[in-house]
Image (cartoon, rainbow, N blue to C red):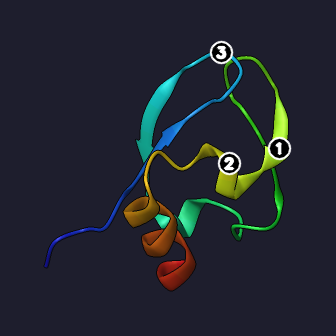
């Protein structure tokens, strides 16, 4: 079985990383960048529309 992941990009500091949807909050919840601590809705950290759809389906 392949594990799903979501590609993330901080709109403030441009840190990019991947994480499992199960480790992330819902797309409309506030998320804090682990690098610069910027706070925004989780949906603003997803890199692409595909990543956002994956997050919504699996979180």
Q: Residue furthest front?
A: 49
Query: Marks 2/3: CA distance?
Result: 13 Å
Element under disc 2: helix
Residue 58 drawn at (x, y percent): 48, 80
Q: Which residue is drawn at 50% across and 66% down?
A: 21
User: Which image quadrant for residue 28?
Assistant: bottom right
Q: Residue at x 43, y 34 (%)?
A: 17
Query: Marks 1/2: CA distance?
Result: 7 Å
Residue 13 numbered tag: 3
Front-most of residues 15 and 49:
49
Residue 32 drawn at (x, y percent): 79, 38
Residue marked by disc 1: 40
Q: In this view, does 14 lie to the left or right of 34?
A: left
Q: Which residue is drawn at 62% across and 30% down?
A: 10
Front-most of residues 28 and 19:
28
Q: Residue furthest left?
A: 1
Residue marked by disc 2: 44
- Quadrant where the image shows the N terminus: bottom left
Q: Is residue 58 left or right of residue 25?
A: left
Sequence-first disc among 1 and 3: 3
């Amino acid at each position: 079985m392949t594990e799903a992941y979501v590609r993330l990009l901080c709109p403030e500091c441009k840190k990019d990383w991947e994480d499992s949807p199960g480790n992330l909050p819902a797309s409309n919840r506030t998320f804090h960048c682990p690098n610069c601590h910027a706070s925004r809705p989780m949906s603003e950290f997803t890199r692409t529309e595909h990543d956002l759809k994956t997050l919504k389906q699996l979180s």
